[in-house]
Image: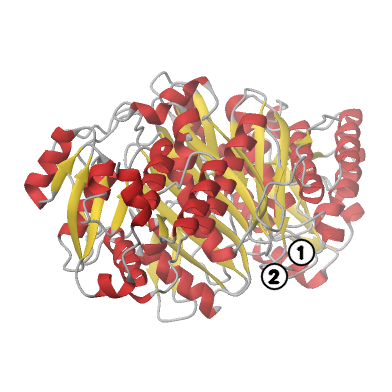
Amino acid sequence: MSTNEAVDKRPATAEEMASRPVRFAVVGTGGMGGTHARNLAGSSEAEVTWLVDIDTDRANKLAADIGGKVTPSMDEAFSSGEVDVALIALPTGLHRMGVEAAAKHKIHVFCEKPIARTNEDAIAMTQICKDAGVTLMVGHVVRFFSEYMRIKEQLEAGTLGDIAMVRGSRINPPVMERSPWFADVAVSGGVVLDLMIHEIDTFRWMFGDVERLFAHGLSFTDWHTKRDHAIASLTFRDGTIAHCEASWAHSAFRTSIEVAGSKGLAKHSSFDSSTLIFEPSTGVEYEGIGQQSKQFTYMRPTVTPPHLRELLVFIDCLRTGKPVPVDGDEATRTLIVANAVLDSMRENRVIEFNEDGSVKQA
Amino acid sequence: MTTKTVKVAMLSFAHQHAIGYAMVLNALPDVEITVIADEDADRGQHWAQTFNTQWVASIDEALAMDVDCVVVCSENVHHKTMTIAAAKAGKHVLCEKPLATTVDDATSMIAACEEAGVQLMTAFPVRFNASILALKDAVHSEHFGETLTIAARNPGTNPGQWFVDPALSGGGAVIDHTVHVVDVLRFIYGAEVTEVYAQSGNKLAGGVSDDTGLLMFKLSNGVPVSLDTSWTRPSNWPIWGGVTLDVIGEFGVLFANAYNNNYDLAETTTPSYTWQPVEHTGDPEMVSAFIDAVRNGTDVPVTGTDGLRALEVALAAMKSAESNQLEPITHA
């Protein structure tokens, strides 16, 4: 049995991983898994040895482009002796299963965000990885987007003074038709666990822990299968007030951040700072309202995409023994706040937090 | 047919909005600024000279003159005494927002005007803005469907002066910037605010008044709204601030940015870079509507009760920011 073999294994050491490209099994080859696999395959620091997906057709198509063996079985990949790191890009509800399987095989883990659907799963996954002696990093990628890194640098330099108000938004077209599992809030956590969790994590990174929140939106209304939209007011322990907006009701993906302090203001919008725009010469309707211009595209191409940057940092941590920037505990604290946003929306109530990041019982 | 000249007394220039209103009044045909009353002699004389009229120090002296109506632009806390004095003198009143600093003051102003048979209008120019009027049509069109949720902002620069002294202003950024958007939403949807959660702070200026505010409230039609009232714009921001509403609807999203019709102006002086209005609508239309109502004896389009309803939300928000709880809105 592979279970017994697994017990005898040990995690790949820093020295081993420093001596050669780090070997990844990408588990789940959908949107995020595909992005990560292509980024890793294009990097000299990494090698994609296995692609794991119950949809082997999808995995085979990806393998034809970037190489790697295909299997529907995590155990087969993890027991091959060819995997240092499992990259878990499964639907959220399956993250725990994937992380546990990797930890059992003493394989380091990079897990897509959110770390889990439930706080209990997140806490358990973090402990399992600690017990197995494997490194766990969670993919809160916004910390690796250049604009958020630059603003964080300004905050640390004190350029903006004492911060009073911060606004972050992450808006997107509805995704429920393309990926129906998102429409089930109990399974996916809706727009809050998919999008708003980025603002929550980024603002925790910038301002520390949350003291209190209130939220409202559509996730628990009859609209949620067609449109989802949420707004949360977070008050941080340092007094910073945050407005977080997440949407599956717009026609194009856009993000923005604005930070206002006693000495100044910094803001960034992905649309305003686009460096390449495609505008179709026909097909956009200007008359009336409610029209969607489906072909209009804006881009900000970069040399190192943020999704590759976070993996390169992870690889560096594995090779040097430095702590990863977003470990299981950090991702769990972010998830607890995100789940509290959902609870506040559902129950129309203010939620307060203890200093250890847990929810204060009413 | 001759048109009767409408004679206006402007009571105090403590609020800088008086300047804009006076510019509109001076440009209107058959309207006369008969007098500017201001206890601050330097300020009163300066604006009287600018607008080619006379200055008096005393409100009572101005109210004793042959005028039809008054425009009250004092510190918020003095709206009550000036409005009641004007009502007793039989003058119609256009009062700057917020209508008052307490519910009791607002209701006594409304009662005094009713008793005297004069009209009381609250100065809410944003509902006269062309984009807001177009937004009102758009959200009620079949192309837009049902309104699902709204994110609104009324950010600005810190006005300083008496605005940051709660004894004169009644608060800070929350009372200053809640009322415009609440009025616009009441105007668009015919709905009232039912409950509010708010957080506020004073970290921007570190003063005694709040300078930061974030409200989360619900309308009686079920629509949830967020409203940022903060004075987050630094003093060298290219424009004073703005009013924006992102309205999420069944079939799309409407973005209203009421004061965004500007041109960029870069000068070699300081401040070097500003956004200058191409056209900002609202003030002229609001002041004209008041004058028309006075001239024709018709109802003013925005009432004292409209001012009271918006004030109730601002005061409940300030209470919530203290209690950290949802506060219900009760109507006086």
Closer to us: B163 or B222: B222
- Can residue B64 be seen here? The reply is no
The answer to whether the residue labelled 2 contacts the one labelled 1, judged by CB atoms less than 8 Å apart, is: yes
Q: Which residue is mark 1?
A: B164
Determine the image quadrant of residue A280: top left
Of tags 2 and 1, the one toward the viewer is 2
Residue type, mark 2 in image: Ala
Q: Residue at x 28, y 43 (%)?
A: A75
Q: Which residue is mark 2?
A: B205
Residue type, mark 1 in image: Val
Q: Chain of mark 1?
A: B
Give me the C-alpha separation between circle 2 and circle 1.
Answer: 9 Å
Determine the image quadrant of residue B47: bottom right
Closer to us: A253 or A135: A135
Q: Is residue B256 left or right of residue A313?
A: right
Pick whichever of labels 2 and 1 is earlier in the sequence. Answer: 1
